[in-house]
Structure formats: C-alpha cells, structure tokens
Image (cartoon, rainbow, N blue to C red):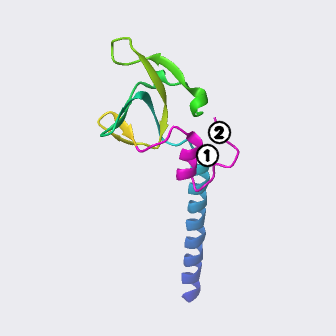
Amino acid sequence: MTEQRRRLRSSTVVLGGMGLLATALTSCGSDPDRRCVDRDSYEYTGGYKIVADKNCSSGSGSTAGKKRGTGGTGKGSKVDADWYYDADVSAGRADGGTFSRSEAVDRDGFGCSGGSGGG
C-alpha cells in the first residue's frame, strides 16, 4: 500500500516538473504582448493611443522596425507608430509598457532573452 503511494507521488512530481519545464521553454520562444501605438499621442492619464497594426512594421524589432503610416483617424494624418510591448490596456490606450522588445522579454520570460532573438 505504501509502495503505491510512493509511485503516485513520484509520478506527480515528474509530471509537475515537466509542466514547469514546458512553461519555461514556451515563455522563452514566444513574443511578448504588443500593441501598435502612436508615439506622439501620450497622455499622462491614459498612455499612448492604440492604432491599427498596419501602421507598424511587420517586424518584431524595436526602433529598427519603425514605420510612418497613415493614421486611423480618418483625417489622413501621419502617425508616428511603433510597437509597444507588455502594456496595460484600457479604453483604447496603452500604458506602463516598453518600446524595447528585448526589455519586454527580460521582464516576462524567466530571463531568457539571451542573444538569440527571434523574429
């Protein structure tokens, strides 16, 4: 009877360890949450205005991937858009994040940014 309990405990420990390992590995390989924002629209009370993803480049780099596009305001105005990572989002605005992808990975992924950035 005690032998059966020991087996159950060890298999539970092994399965739990495998789950933790899988979580750590997927955290390293995945991109952090990102939003396309207008860098010129910052407000102290709400942060940056979120704009359509088409205004940001498709690359996942930080400032190297910046692109100027037309805004979603309907006025044809230019938007200084860039990806903003790991932000708190509320009412169409993003705040508390970073424009640096590598910094966002360092904050979220168990310190696994290394030198092997994905793309």
Residue 87, picture quadrant = top left
Callout 1 touching callout 2 (CB < 8 Å): yes
Can you identify the residue that label 2 sits on? 118
Residue at 51% in and 37% down: 99
Residue at 47% in and 21% down: 55
Callout 2: 10 Å neighbours few (<14), some, many (20+)? few
Residue 18, picture quadrant = bottom right
Q: Is residue 43 left or right of residue 81?
A: left
Q: Earlier in the sequence, mark 1 or mark 2?
A: 1
Residue 73, picture quadrant = top left
Residue at 55% in and 39% down: 100
At label 2, the amino acid type is Gly
Can you identify the residue that label 1 sits on? 29
Spatial distance from mark 1 to mark 2, Cα to Cα?
A: 7 Å
Compared to 95, does 107 lie above or below? Answer: below
Q: Secondary structure at mark 1?
A: helix
Callout 1: 10 Å neighbours few (<14), some, many (20+)? some
Q: Main secondary structure of the magenta part?
A: loop
The answer to whether any part of residue 59 appears in the image is no
Compared to 72, does 50 lie above or below? Answer: below
Question: Where is residue 76 drawn, in percent x and y?
Answer: 38, 11
The answer to whether any part of residue 34 appears in the image is yes
